[in-house]
Image (spheres, rainbow, N blue to C red):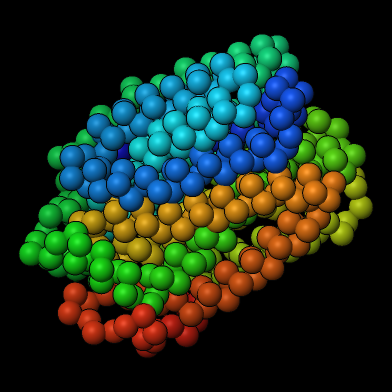
Amino acid sequence: MVTIVVAGSIITAVSLGVRATMGLFTDAIDVSLGVGVDTFGLTIALQNLVWGLSQPLAGAIADRFGAGRVLIVGAAVYAGGLLVMANADGAAGLHTGGGLIVGLGMSAASFAVVLSSIGKLVEPNQRSMALGIATAFGSFGHFLLVPLTRVFIDLLGWRGSMVVLAAVTMTIAAVVRPLRTGTRIAGAPDAETAGPDSAGTPTSAPDHESLGQVTGRALRHRDYLLVNAAFFVCGFHVTFIGVHLPKSLTDAGYATSIATWSLALIGLFNIFGAFSAGVLGVRFNKSRLLSIIYITRAVAFVGLVVLPVTPAVALGFGALLGVVWLASVPLTSGIVLGQFGLRNAGTLFGFVFLSHQLGAFAGAYGGGWVREATGSYDLWWWLAAILSIGAAAIHFAISERPVPRDSGEGVTGIQESAGQDLVDTR
């Protein structure tokens, strides 16, 4: 398991780390190209929309041909988009490079492909922890690359920094070997074998069930649709914050260095948060844990708006939010794996991730539009808090039980365990 998790961790560290730096470029690009905050927000919104729309296809290709090839191609496209962005002279170049091309690259070099691959390759009783470790290291990349990119921008300008990030992105291609098709550790489940694992999770759809059939079954299943709805909120949160937090804090009177370190602390504290979520997900109901995560986010958002403007508030916000930043990812992917098994995991999580990216589009573009229209991000912070409470409520209604292939349950069917408490689910 070690080499698989190490490879996945490095890839998520690079992919998520580079993505986390985008908010640092807002002011520099605005000044250099004369575009508004809303224009750059639209670039990142398009990036996330394209990423989401292409993620199910990238997941399906990875399921069919292996994650290794998909990740290598994704890294090359991702880096190419950053280079196009580095040479942009207006909104069109930003939207093409940073929106369309980077979005396509991210879909193939993203944690969605990595996590579905790890889920297939490790033993069932280690799966949740392995997903948590890989997600946590994505946050280490966040913590490392955000302050470094701030230094790069100061020394090399925003264009030079984009070139450096493109080079960093290509390191993904050097570490994909353990995630290739056919690589399995001793005792790990075979993704082509039907039947439940020792924890009661089906390891795959039956061989005679086509991708279209399992996808249709998922899209008719109430709890899968609720997972999609809640993950929309997660996308809204992380992309709005990743793109607009630095500008929001400097608007409020914080120094640029405080804004940078607040964003960096999100990554640092998420190392603990994501790993802890993976460990807790082995023992406890993942849906209940997700409700706690979303309530914590709501408290953080309200606190940022109503508390006085001090460095302690900004840095404390980054630390608190970091604990619950990507903790939702291993838990959400674990729910999908538990409901439908491994065979089409990349595709089914790809659809969930599409919902996440639709939320990301709304968070990134809406945040920029509100800032330009009102001169403040306060309205969007309040909306983020309200959506967070809604997502917490949704997770209280989600069942994690495996979905029987011949279940006649419709979209509105209610699982027996929908109201189970936060208890041991092993």
State which quarter of the image contains the N terminus: top left
Would residue 312 be visible to someone looking at this image? Answer: no
Q: Residue furthest left?
A: 208
Quarter-of-image position of residue 143? top right
For residue 206, above or below residue 329: below
Residue in view at x 38 percent, y 77 percent? 222
Total marks drawn?
0
- 173 or 190: nearer the eye? 173
For residue 369, above or below residue 291: above
Residue in view at x 36 percent, y 86 percent? 413
Relative to residue 106, is residue 255 drawn left or right? right
For residue 16, above or below residue 364: above
Relative to residue 190, is residue 80 drawn left or right? right
- 210 or 401: nearer the eye? 210
Residue 361 x, y percent position in the rendering: 56, 50
Residue 302 x, y percent position in the rendering: 78, 61
Residue 409 x, y percent position in the rendering: 29, 84
Would residue 54 be visible to someone looking at this image? Answer: yes
Relative to residue 124, is residue 389 drawn left or right? right
Residue in view at x 65 percent, y 40 percent? 41
Residue in view at x 51 percent, y 73 percent? 395
- 200 or 83: nearer the eye? 83
Quarter-of-image position of residue 282? bottom left
Relative to residue 111, is residue 366 drawn left or right? right
Residue 56 x, y percent position in the rendering: 33, 50
State which quarter of the image contains the C terminus: bottom left
